[in-house]
Image: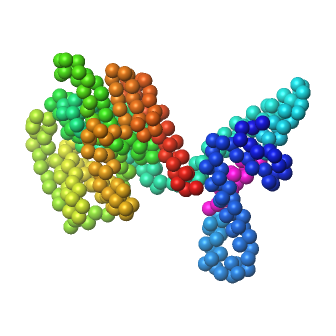
Amino acid sequence: MARGINTRDSRPETRDFYIRGPMITLEKARKIKEEYDKLSTELMDPAVINNRELYQKKIKAYSDCKPVVSKYEEYLKTASALADSEEIAAKEADGEMKQMAVHDAEESRKKIAVIEKELEFILLPKDPNDKKNAIFEIRAGTGGDEAGLFAAELYKMYVRWAEKNKFKVDLMDSSPTELGGLKEAIFMLIGPNAFGRTKFESGTHRVQRVPTTETSGRIHTSAATVFVLPEQEEVDVQLRPEDLKIEVQRASGAGGQHVNKTESAVRIVHLPTGLEVYCQDGRSQIKNKEKAMTILRARVKNRLEGEEKAKLDSTRKAQIGSGDRSEKIRTYNYPQNRVTDHRIGLTVYNLEAVLQGDLDEFIEKLTEDNNKKLLEQEI
């Protein structure tokens, strides 16, 4: 008998076919099917037909329900076939009929698994930002020089992951340390669904290891913050010239040495919000200004959206934390060769592979966890 399938009533129209795993998905689909049937009846009502505005509203709702209902009905049909096959397999003695029923049941289970995933995807609320490019901001937090070295390793880790997944990386700004670390790095990940794939990397990342400068062999804990924003086009966020304070100056590198003698570095302040961007990596003032404006649009959009959402993410600090050791989403522990994501309780013991860009398991599990929560909120 199929796990979780109710076959007490053999009539197809009254059977409830629920596999325990996707209960939330199926319950939501069932409610949409009820709404769909209700709308179908209402659309035949002369009072609705003669009210053009009401009719258009209901026909749109009916149309929106249709993909879910179609997939849900496919699920019910397949689950019914599974129940029938298992019933035959249970009754038949060993023989060709039993083998055929067992085979059909297995094929139905495989099809159900596919349909469940497709149904879950259709039901998920869509984030319009997911398809956009992603702007990463990595900053050294608590831990001095060691934090800067860790920030540089995180930057390399994301670059390696991007290369493996065919994303382009555009370094927009960086501030190196004298020891080869990074105080800050801002770059854009360019490619389909870049933000959707990486948005859960935002937060404080913590490293535990013995620094090369530590003579007593004591393990230190340092931190770096990662912040991921969706790129915003000019049509998405319009910044008025009178709201911007733009300054140009000479770019400088680590140790205060001038990268060039021209005023190529650009600093832009958005006066209404106080948000500030500084870009110096490019040799061209025009290029640096373009990159600074791109970063500023993303930050302004995030600020405005945060305020609209009851200030849940009204400041960048609220989302990424202060860089303090105690605020963490992921820990990279060198002595134990361990990486742990504290949000989903996932631990892997292949730290070097993760630092080489093997992040897919974390990304997939975080996405699955988020999808589950979204479905629970919607039901």
Residue 61 versus residue 72 in the image, above or below: below
- Residue nearest the viewer, comparing 361 with 161: 361
Seen from this angle, which residue lies furthest front? 8
The x, y position of residue 364, in whole percent, is: 49, 38
Residue under the image location 73 percent in, 47 percent down: 17
Number of dots carrying numbers: 0
* Dominant secondary structure, magenta: helix
Q: Residue at x 46, y 33 (%)?
A: 346
Where does the image place residue 131, in percent across and percent down from the top left? 46, 50
Give the magenta-colored segment's residue range: 64-77
**Camera-side residue: 140 or 375?**
375
Q: Nearer the viewer, residue 310 or 276?
A: 310
Q: Position of residue 259 (x, y in %)?
A: 14, 38
Give the side of residue 253 with respect to residue 231, left or right.
left
Q: Is 33 situated above or below 7?
A: below
Q: Is residue 251 above or below residue 165?
A: below
Image position of 8 (left or right of 205): right
Quarter placement of the N terminus? top right
Q: Quadrant of residue 299?
A: bottom left
In the shown orientation, is residue 10 left or right of residue 233? right
**Image quarter hosting the C terminus:** bottom right
Q: Is residue 334 magenta?
A: no
Whether residue 330 is visible to the viewer of this picture, yes or no, is yes
Q: Residue at x 86, y 36 (%)?
A: 88
Does 68 lie within the magenta span?
yes
- Is 108 displayed left or right of 231 in the figure? right
> Would residue 290 be visible to someone looking at this image?
no
Which residue is rendered at x = 45% and y = 35% of the image? 345
